[in-house]
Image: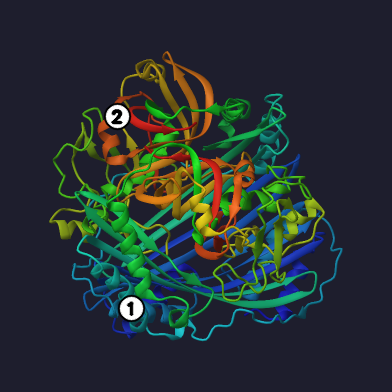
Amino acid sequence: MDFNAFKQAVIAAAKAQGVDEYELYYQSGETTSVGVFNHEINEFSSSVSGGVCFRCIVGGHMGYASTEDLSEASAQSLVARAAANAAVLETSEQEFLGEGGKTYEPLDLHPYELPTTEELVDTVLKGEQAVLSADPAVAEGSSASARTSKRVIAIANSKGLDLHYENNTATFSVEAVVTDGTEMANDYKSKSGPFAELDLAELVKEPVEGAKAQLGAGVAPTGSYPVVFAPKAMAGLLRTFSTVFSGETVQRGLSRMGGKEGETVAAPIVTLVDDPFYPESQMPINFDAEGSPAHKKNVVENGKLVTLLYNLKTAAAAGKETTGNAAKASYNATVTVQPFTFYLAPGDLTEEDLLKKAGNGVYINSLGGMHAGANVVSGDFSLQSAGFLIENGEKTRSVKSFTVAGNFYTLLQQITAISDKVELPGFGGISAVGSPAVLVEGLTIAGK
Amino acid sequence: MISRAICEAVLHKAVSTGADYAEIFAENTLDHSINMVAGKVESVNDAVIAGAGIRVYKGLRSVMATTTDTTESGLLRCAQRAAEALGQGAAEIDICLHERLYGDIHPVRIVPSTVSNQSKIDVLKEGCFAAKEYSDAIKQVTGTLLDVDHNILIASSEGLYAQDRQIRTRLMIQAVAEKNGETQTGAARPGRRMGMEMFEHEVNAREAGIHAAKQAITMAGAGYCPAGVMPVAIGNGFGGVIFHEACGHSLEATSVAYGMSQFTGKLGQQIANPKVTAVDDGTIPNAWGSINIDDEGTPAQKNILIEKGILKSYMIDKFNGRRMGMPSTGNARRQSYAFTTTSRMTNTYIAEGEDNNDDIIASIEYGLFAKEMGGGSVNPVTGAFNFAVNEGYMIRNGKICEPVRGAALVGTGSEVIQNIDMVGTQLDMGQGMCGSSSGSIPTNVGQPLIRVSSITVGGR
């Protein structure tokens, strides 16, 4: 059955089982993706997915259960499982179901027509050709892919909340693999938006140049240097450590931002913004996972922590209002707290100015191993890096297989310059992180 | 699950436009998890994941379509989508399915879904409380007990109709210690491909909690690891993540078939130090990464990947095997029906060597003992890998000295496996979730104590 019919079945089951405070969260997606290798479409996939998460307050506790099987029998067991899961909880914090907001900011979705399957195929074949012919160093194995995605989110609860959201996106991605005969290197680029606006020849330049720049890389010297992080490297770092600004993380004693609202936590040039309507976001949305209105806010302003991020439960525990940051990692996950598009506000210097300011140091183009080399509790990180040496204010030879080490809480204070252009790398769904390039003093590089 | 007759009809539809192979992968999974924070049960969640993925091949082209509607009509519509996407043509093969029964080499005595939440909470509390009570320096403990009941059915145009039930249980405890205003973490994450009987003889929840607490306290009192190139001894168990990242991923057909691996075309060649023999074995009874059959229905195998430094085998699935002209090695895996299957690891380890553990430590004048590793990642194209050291100690003059924190190891796979020049004798395994294009799957990593003669250590 479809979601609306299933919703009625679940509501009837809840009534029959004596569950009167409940919520359904529905998410569905339709994705078509096409990949090419050796001038032939080698992968095509068409997926339809979706499910319903049911949660209910029983005895003051919130139980969860979810399913992808939208049948009558499933509706009965969904309610029973969630109620049974609520029965064993031991938390003392008050649980909430959202009542929604009086108003929601209007959404400006700029809908565009998704490419047809034929257009997807045509674009990846042309994209592969563009990357293969971009440079003599490009190797077979370079590839292109394209996907379209239609997403629906709906929330309905016993407090009368009834919200619906739909959004479509189309994304083209290219991987450039280059070789100099002895070693290989690769780099990626993705772009979302109407395919009619894609300039393939232009788009493939960046990954081709990025991959070529890695060839023949030397080893960075070990020591403490000024470091310039490229926008995508800094965005990766911010994404990993964004949880330190979550009220939930703070209340669990897993972040050092606890009790710091109103205090200085970063250098005065640092302003961190959370914006659900960021223009380049692929999924701008005007309500959070509890149905509260979403809005733009400064989390850190000129170095001062303005607010942590909250949902209804963590806000109540802190004696505050929700910031509209309830989130779900997937439709079947429990509600947590997360930013929408989280970014470091731009400064007024160019990237070249940052290099000049650094003088002699290291430019880090990419960081790896975030899930392992960064400890979000202590703030310590030691991460695989690749990039360039900075000599006399300019990028010179490329370096790889080194690490950059520091502590995120200290790094916020060590930022001495910020470039003027925010980049939003990757395709993050509702949650995305962006950054300009930044100059940081006092980090340790481990190379040779 | 889905009857043989329905599968035949759906496969007929799937090959109707000229596919030379078609496959149905249907799934019904129950994921259950209990979370504890600060001594209290914070959340209990369970999720039913149910759907099917239909793949068709023609030569080196593959098409997949997925659906959550596993009724006959839903599956037929899904097969129709796959067939249409493949192109236009007429059916060239016939379908006749025979049920195949594989023996279960991973018996489960206590199916987790038949155990009450309360009994599971008792186990979780035992672990979490043991960590909290270990020392006043432990400020926070979080714990998760999760179990997965993963039922799969695979039917293919080659006549296969087989089912498997994969049950897994895992306990995860993280402790946070604070000393002089510095916080550090410690963790234990034991898991098995078995049910709740895991806690009777294989895993002791209390010991797991104490392990996490001890590690957090040791690291909270530690100074930063110095940076530089040095010899490193890597402990057994989860230390095997070094092989998994530095070499394992680059031996998967998903990279090798496309020439996107440092090891493409190197079968029979010396790629590693002669001390290194490496194995991927999906048949170890009840091990975390074990399977009866892979997600294309091929029985799990024990594959010798590297024997005394010589490359013997890749890890191959059927589709990439076509491009390579090689048969499947039983390594086709996917997180769920919604992901496209590819070649993945199961239980991957460096086999026991002949070096005495004490000799390995004694051989290092100045270096690092990475007693317990964290996770890592690799770019198979370049071989550049990284992983974190969760618990490390300096070695001076052949002796293990003070603990150090914040260390990471980086390098290139083809180099590091040449530099593994001592291999100890006590093989142990550690459990992880491995992420790649076909999703997140359970894998074991393992090794005895090893020495890497020279590697870049990131610290400060």
Q: Is residue A430 visible?
A: yes
Which quadrant of the view contains residue B305? bottom right
Which residue is found at the position 32% from the left and 53% from the top? B219
Q: Is residue B42 visible?
A: no
Q: Using the numbered discs, state the Cα–Cα distance from disc 1 to disc 2 in whole angstroms.
A: 45 Å
Q: Is residue B238 left or right of residue B206?
A: right
Up/down of B218 relative to B381, above or below:
below
* SS state under label 1: helix
Check whether the beta carbons of the residues at disc 1 and disc 2 lie within 8 A of each other.
no
Q: Is residue A305 left or right of residue B74?
A: left
Name which residue type carries label 2.
Ile
Name which residue type carries label 1.
Ile
- Residue with the mark numbered 1: B121
Up/down of A78 relative to A327, above or below:
below
- Residue with the mark numbered 2: A415
Q: Position of residue A242 (x, y in %)?
A: 32, 45
Q: Position of residue A21 (x, y in %)?
A: 26, 74
Q: Disc 1 sits on a residue from what chain?
A: B
Q: Position of residue A6 (x, y in %)?
A: 44, 73
* SS state under label 2: strand
Q: Position of residue A410 (x, y in %)?
A: 27, 37
Q: Are marks 1 and 2 on the same chain?
A: no
- Closest to the observer, B137 or B45: B137
Q: Is residue B232 left or right of residue A82?
A: right
Which residue is found at the position 61% from the left and 62% from the top? B352
